[in-house]
C-alpha cells in the first residue's frame, strides 16, 4: 500500500521540474494525508541515498527534488553547453528569404523584411548557414548572399531544387486538424 | 433528431464501404456489389438529407461502384472465362490495404504515447532554455523554413493572397467546358471527358458538372450496351453558347439525389 | 571503473530530458568508445528494470530516455495539467500510412485513404511528426514525405524497423473495429 504511494510520489518528482512540497503532492492525491506523504518522501530520500546512484532526492526550497550529485556536474554542464544553438524567428525568416531568393543582396532582403539585418547576416555567416557568393555588378558592388552546404544538411535537403516551392506550400492546405 | 445520433460519421468512402460490408456480414472477397452499391447510395442520400456535406471522394467512389456494378451485369465470355478479371478486384484490393493500415493506426494509438501515457524527465530550467520563440536548430524543420518564408512575404505584401484553395476546379466552369465540347456534334463519350491525365479533384469536378448538367436537363446519358462507354447527348446546347453560367448555386440535397439516380438508372 | 562510466552516463540521461544516442554520449566523453557506452546503457536499462521504480530507461528514437511507467499516467497528467493534444483518427491513419509506406507522395496516401488529405499533412508537418524527405523522380517531381525522430519519440519506438509488422488481412469481421 505504502509502496504504491511511494512510487506515485516518486513518479511525480520524476516528471516534474520544480521542487514539490508535501502540500502540493497532497493536493494531487486526494484521500492522502500530509503525514503519510511526508513519511514516503523521507523513505524515498533514504532509499536513493542507499542506492548510490548519480542523483539524490534533495530537500530544497521547502520541497523535494531529484538532483544530480556535484561529482557529475562537469559532464552535465558540458552536455548543456553543447545543446544545439537556436535560431530566432527573425533569423529563420531571413534565412528563408535568402534560401528562396538567392542570389540576393542585403538591400533586397532588408526591403522584404523591412528592418536592418546586418546582425542577423553576421550570425548566419558565422553559423555557416549562408555564404558570400560574390558581388553584384551594381554601383557600390554590393555583396551577394547564398546558402551553404551546411544549410542543406540542416534541412535535410539534397539540393536547392528540392526546396518546396511557394505553390507547393500553398497546396498543403490550411488544415488545423486536431 | 434522434436520427442523427444513429448516423455514424465516416472518414471517407472506404470507411463507409467497410462498414456496409460488415453490417451485411458478407465476405470481402465476394462482395454483393449491387446490394452494397444501393446501400452506399442510400447512405449518401441520407447524408445529404441531413445536410451533411458529401465530399467529392464519396461521389467518386459512388461512380466507381456503379461502374463495377454495370460490369458485373455483363455476360461473361465462356472461352476466356479464366482470364477475365473480377471487376470487383480493384475495390477489394484497396479495401484490404485500407483495413491493414487502419489496424496499424490502431496499433500505433495503443502504444505508450509520450505525454499521454508516459512522461520524460521534467526539464530543469536555470535559464538554460532559450526563449520560447527561438527554434532549436537540431529540431528546425523544412516546414518551419517554408512557413517563415511565407510569413516574410505576407508581412511585406499583405495583399498577395496566399490563399488555400479548397476547390481547385470550378464545377460551373467544367459544365461550360463540357458543353463546349459538344460543338459541332451531338454525342460525346464519357471516356472522352476523362481521356487526359487529370487530378482526382479535377475528375470529381467533371463528374459533378456532369451530374448537374443531367439534372438541369442540358444533357442526357445513355449506355448503348451493358458495359459499353457512357454516351452523352446534348439537349440544350444553345443555353451554354450564350450564357455564362452565372450565380445559380448548385443545389445539392434532394435534387442532386435525383441526378445520381438518373445516372445510375441509365447505366 | 565501469561503475563510474555507468553513473556518468546515468547522470547525463537523468539531467537531460531528450533521448540520447550512444554517439551523442560518446561525443561528451572523450576517450570512451562506442562499445563501452552501449554496454553500460544496456546495464543501466536492466538495472532499472530490476529495481522496479516508477520509471524505466527506455530505448526510443535511436537513443535512450528515462520514462515514467504508464501506471502513473493519471497522477502525472494531473500534476502537469495536461490535456493531451490527441490526434484525430484521420490524422492517425494518415500518419501510419506515412510511417509504413515511406518514402511516399501525397497522391499515394490519398489513394490509400480514399480521401483528400492536404490539411492533415500540413498539421502533421507543423507538429513535426512528418517531414519533407525530398522529391520523387516523377513528372512534376512530387514531394516525398517521411516520419521524423519526434514521431519515434512520441510513439515509443526504438527505430522505424521496430514498427509492428503489418498484419495480413484475410477475414473481415474479426473485431478490428474499435
Image (cartoon, coloured by chain):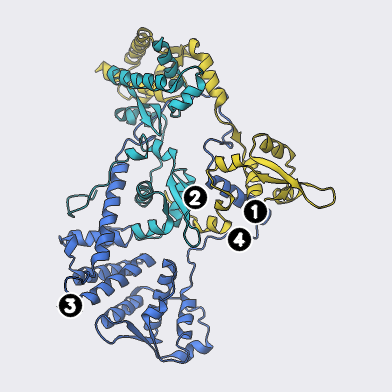
Chain colours: A yellow, B blue, C cyan
Residue B118, horizontal then vertical, whole percent: 35, 31
**Chain of residue at mark 3:** B
- Number of other residues with Cα within 10 Å of mark 1, as a class: few under 14, some 14 to 19, many 20 or more: some
Q: Secondary structure at mark 1?
A: helix
Residue B177, horizontal then vertical, whole percent: 48, 81
Residue B73, horizontal then vertical, whole percent: 20, 78
Which residue is at a point 49% across and 10% down the rendered structure image?
Answer: A71
Q: Nearer the viewer, mark 2 or mark 4?
A: 2
Badge 2 and badge 1 both on one subunit? no
Which residue is at a point 37% across and 40% down the rendered structure image?
Answer: C160
Q: Which residue is mark 2?
A: C134
Q: Which residue is mark 4?
A: B161
In this rendering, the answer to whether B92 lies above or below C144 is below
Q: Quadrant of residue B57?
A: bottom left
**Chain of residue at mark 2:** C
Which residue is at a point 28% across and 83% down the rendered structure image?
Answer: B266
Q: CA distance from mark 4 to mark 3?
A: 55 Å
Q: Which residue is mark 3?
A: B76
Label whose residue precedes the other's in the sequence (4 or 1)? 1
Q: Secondary structure at mark 3?
A: loop
Q: CA distance from mark 2 to mark 3?
A: 46 Å
Q: Are marks 4 and 1 in contact (CB under 8 Å)?
A: no
Query: Farthest residue in the right direction?
Result: A139
Q: Nearer the viewer, mark 1 or mark 3?
A: 3
Q: Which residue is mark 1?
A: B153
- Number of other residues with Cα within 10 Å of mark 4, as a class: few under 14, some 14 to 19, many 20 or more: few
Q: CA distance from mark 2 to mark 4?
A: 27 Å
Residue A57, horizontal then vertical, whole percent: 41, 13
Which residue is at a point 70% across and 40% down the rendered structure image?
Answer: A121
Q: CA distance from mark 2 to mark 1?
A: 24 Å
Amino acid at each position: 500500500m505504502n509502496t504504491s504511494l511511494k512510487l506515485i510520489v516518486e513518479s511525480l518528482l520524476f516528471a516534474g521540474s520544480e521542487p514539490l512540497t508535501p502540500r502540493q503532492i497532497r493536493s494531487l492525491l486526494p484521500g492522502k494525508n500530509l503525514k503519510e506523504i511526508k513519511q514516503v518522501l523521507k523513505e524515498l530520500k533514504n532509499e536513493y541515498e542507499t542506492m548510490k546512484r548519480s542523483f539524490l532526492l534533495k530537500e530544497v526550497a521547502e520541497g523535494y527534488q531529484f538532483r544530480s550529485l556535484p561529482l557529475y556536474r562537469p559532464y552535465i554542464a558540458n552536455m548543456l553547453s553543447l545543446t544545439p544553438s537556436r535560431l530566432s524567428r527573425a533569423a529563420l525568416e531571413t534565412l528563408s528569404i535568402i534560401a528562396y531568393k538567392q542570389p540576393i543582396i542585403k538591400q533586397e532582403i532588408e526591403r522584404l523584411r523591412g528592418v536592418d539585418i546586418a546582425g542577423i547576416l553576421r550570425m548566419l555567416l558565422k553559423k555557416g548557414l549562408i555564404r558570400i557568393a560574390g558581388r553584384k555588378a551594381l554601383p557600390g558592388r554590393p555583396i551577394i548572399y547564398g546558402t551553404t552546404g551546411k544549410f542543406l544538411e540542416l534541412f535535410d535537403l539534397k539540393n536547392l531544387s528540392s526546396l518546396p516551392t511557394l505553390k507547393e506550400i500553398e497546396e498543403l492546405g490550411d488544415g488545423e486538424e486536431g | 433528431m434522434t436520427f442523427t445520433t444513429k448516423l455514424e460519421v465516416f472518414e471517407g468512402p472506404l470507411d463507409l464501404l467497410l462498414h456496409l460490408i460488415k453490417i451485411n456480414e458478407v465476405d470481402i472477397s465476394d462482395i454483393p456489389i449491387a446490394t452494397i452499391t444501393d446501400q452506399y447510395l442510400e447512405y449518401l442520400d441520407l447524408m445529404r438529407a441531413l445536410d451533411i456535406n458529401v465530399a467529392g471522394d464519396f461521389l467518386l467512389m459512388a461512380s466507381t461502384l456503379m461502374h463495377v456494378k454495370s460490369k458485373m451485369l455483363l455476360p461473361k465470355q465462356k472461352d476466356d472465362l479464366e482470364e477475365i478479371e473480377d471487376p470487383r478486384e480493384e475495390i477489394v484490393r484497396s479495401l484490404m490495404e485500407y483495413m491493414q493500415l487502419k489496424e496499424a493506426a490502431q496499433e500505433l494509438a495503443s502504444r505508450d504515447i509520450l505525454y499521454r501515457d508516459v512522461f520524460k524527465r521534467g526539464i530543469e530550467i536555470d535559464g538554460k532554455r532559450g526563449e520560447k520563440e527561438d527554434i532549436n536548430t537540431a529540431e528546425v524543420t523544412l516546414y518551419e523554413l517554408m512557413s517563415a518564408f511565407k510569413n516574410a512575404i505576407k508581412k511585406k505584401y499583405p495583399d498577395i493572397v496566399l490563399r488555400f484553395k479548397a476547390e481547385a476546379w470550378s464545377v460551373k466552369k467544367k459544365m461550360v467546358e463540357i458543353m463546349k465540347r459538344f460543338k459541332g456534334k451531338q454525342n460525346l463519350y464519357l471516356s472522352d471527358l476523362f481521356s487526359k491525365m487529370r487530378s482526382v479533384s479535377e475528375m470529381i469536378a467533371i463528374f459533378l458538372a456532369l451530374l448537374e448538367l443531367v439534372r438541369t436537363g442540358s444533357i442526357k446519358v445513355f449506355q448503348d450496351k451493358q458495359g459499353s462507354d457512357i454516351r452523352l447527348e446534348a439537349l440544350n446546347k444553345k443555353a451554354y453558347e450564350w450564357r455564362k453560367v452565372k450565380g445559380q448555386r448548385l443545389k445539392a440535397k434532394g435534387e442532386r439525389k435525383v441526378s445520381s439516380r438518373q445516372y445510375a438508372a441509365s447505366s
